[in-house]
Image (spheres, helix red, strand yellow):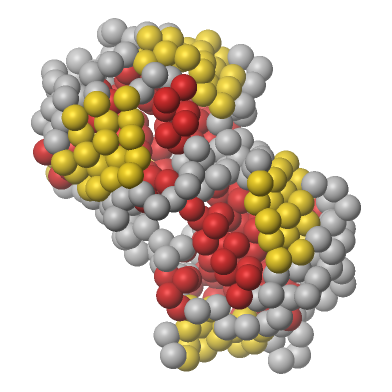
């Protein structure tokens, strides 16, 4: 079990460059097996999830190499094999292999998905989509067996709820199906646009991404001819913006697409955070007077559920109460007891996170039970007086590219003790 040790209470300054989007990367890597030729991805974040997905590719006889944020994947000798339950349960995004294996082979056997424990995230909409395309779905030995004995055929799929995962999985299955697939009530996230750009550049025919109706005309083959640059990670960007507003003496956050963060930027400016939003970077000025706000998470372009936790420590510095309502994952609260250990005036009340002004946090021993909760604890530890030890810090490494190096560049006193070399 990895540990992160932070000596807090210092003001930080300098610049930080945002890496490629985790949520794009974990969809595009499974999508790469739909190609008949080798694939090159650039600006890939150096995070644990990438290495986990590379292990799963190796199980399928797919060669891959990863150096200097460039990931090369060669699926030309791919073999259809069941993906082991153990590996799949360690990484929820591995469920995208359902769609890509189904699209490539007409069959997929995948263990039940895992990932962060932030409440129920059912895959019924994924299954609904696969069935609409002509697949049969059954459970066997703790795995999901999906098979299209007569091939995949385009169809209309109306999602009962907006789901990023289901939208992506249906795209992956439909892109090489016969005929036209229409996904209605589709998710609009930038990472879905990034995936579609990657696939379209290989010859796919996907239109309407970024709107609620996506149209996919199936093609028989996909061929990669150019490298694909992953978009900047808006969640990493929001995390560092929150960090900069909490403990910064002037921090420049580079490689940002500001429009992907409209809801988040509006909310921190409502709090009183002073920003200079530039073409592809944002400078965060030192902050003194902050006001409490109410945040309600919602699907993109609303306030991202992944950013409610990184924003929480900043709310402690406000002069009045803040409220968070997470309408996406209401049980995303496992960081709250850990913040309370540090002296935070915070509680969960009637399904809402209530954050009251807190004069001083104190370093102690806490546990990062998932990625974004870990980021929240990290920012709180940088604010706190004394030393904080974050256990299960490997969860933070799952979502944040080269985070120790980036924190050192901001003059943070942070050490990491774990077996990862990144």
Is residue 169 at least partly visible in the picture? no
Along the line of sight, the residue nearer the viewer: 14 or 283? 14
Question: Quarter-wise, where is residue 32 in the image?
Answer: bottom right
Q: How many numbered discs sit on the rendered protein? A: 0
Along the line of sight, the residue nearer the viewer: 73 or 171? 73
Q: Residue at x 32, y 60 (%)?
A: 117
Along the line of sight, the residue nearer the viewer: 78 or 160? 78
Q: Residue at x 76, y 85 (%)?
A: 151
Q: Residue at x 78, y 75 (%)?
A: 77
Indicate left or right for 44 with 200 as reference: left
Question: Quarter-wise, where is residue 27 in the image?
Answer: bottom right
Is residue 65 at least partly visible in the picture? yes
Above or below: residue 139 compared with residue 274 = below
The quadrant the N terminus occupies is: bottom left
Q: Position of residue 250 (x, y in %)?
A: 43, 10
Indicate left or right for 284 with 154 as reference: left
Q: Position of residue 278 (x, y in %)?
A: 61, 14
Q: Position of residue 199 (x, y in %)?
A: 77, 56
Question: Quarter-wise, where is residue 241 in the image?
Answer: top left
Q: Residue at x 41, y 61 (%)?
A: 115
């Amino acid at each position: 079990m990895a540990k992160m040790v932070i000596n807090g209470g210092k003001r930080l300054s300098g610049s930080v460059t945002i890496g490629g989007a985790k949520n794009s990367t974990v969809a595009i890597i499974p999508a790469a097996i739909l190609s008949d030729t080798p694939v090159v991805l650039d600006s890939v974040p150096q995070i644990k999830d990438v290495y986990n997905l590379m292990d799963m590719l190796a199980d399928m006889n797919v060669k891959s190499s990863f150096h200097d944020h460039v990931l090369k994947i060669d699926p030309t000798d791919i073999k259809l094999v069941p993906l082991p339950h153990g590996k799949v349960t360690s990484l929820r995004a591995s469920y995208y292999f359902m769609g890509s294996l189904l699209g490539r082979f007409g069959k997929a056997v995948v263990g039940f998905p895992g990932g962060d424990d932030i409440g129920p995230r059912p895959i019924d909409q994924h299954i609904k989509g696969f069935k609409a395309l002509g697949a049969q779905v059954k459970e066997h030995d703790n795995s999901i067996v999906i098979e299209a004995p007569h091939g995949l055929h385009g169809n209309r799929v109306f999602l009962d709820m907006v789901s990023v995962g289901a939208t992506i999985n249906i795209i992956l299955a439909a892109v090489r199906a016969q005929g036209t697939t229409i996904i209605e009530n589709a998710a609009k996230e930038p990472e879905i646009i990034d995936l579609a750009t990657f696939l379209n550049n290989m010859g796919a025919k996907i239109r309407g991404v970024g709107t609620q109706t996506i149209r996919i005309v199936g093609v028989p083959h996909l061929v990669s001819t150019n490298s694909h640059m992953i978009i900047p990670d808006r969640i990493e960007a929001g995390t560092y913006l929150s960090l900069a507003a909490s403990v910064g003496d002037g921090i420049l956050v580079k490689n940002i697409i500001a429009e992907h963060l409209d809801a988040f930027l509006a909310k921190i400016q409502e709090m009183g955070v002073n920003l200079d939003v530039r073409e592809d970077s944002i400078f965060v000025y030192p902050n003194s007077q902050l006001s409490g706000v109410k945040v309600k998470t919602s699907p993109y372009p609303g306030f991202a559920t992944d950013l409610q936790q990184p924003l929480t420590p900043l709310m402690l510095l406000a002069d009045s109460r803040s409220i968070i309502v997470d309408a996406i994952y209401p049980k995303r609260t496992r960081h709250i007891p850990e913040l309370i250990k540090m002296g935070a005036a915070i509680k969960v009340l009637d399904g809402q996170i209530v954050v009251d002004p807190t004069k001083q946090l104190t370093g102690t021993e806490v546990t990062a039970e998932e990625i974004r909760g870990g980021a929240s604890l990290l920012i709180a530890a940088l604010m706190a007086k004394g030393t904080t030890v974050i256990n299960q810090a490997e969860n933070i490494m799952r979502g944040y590219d080269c985070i120790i190096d980036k924190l050192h560049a901001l003059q943070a006193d942070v050490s990491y003790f774990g077996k990862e070399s990144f």
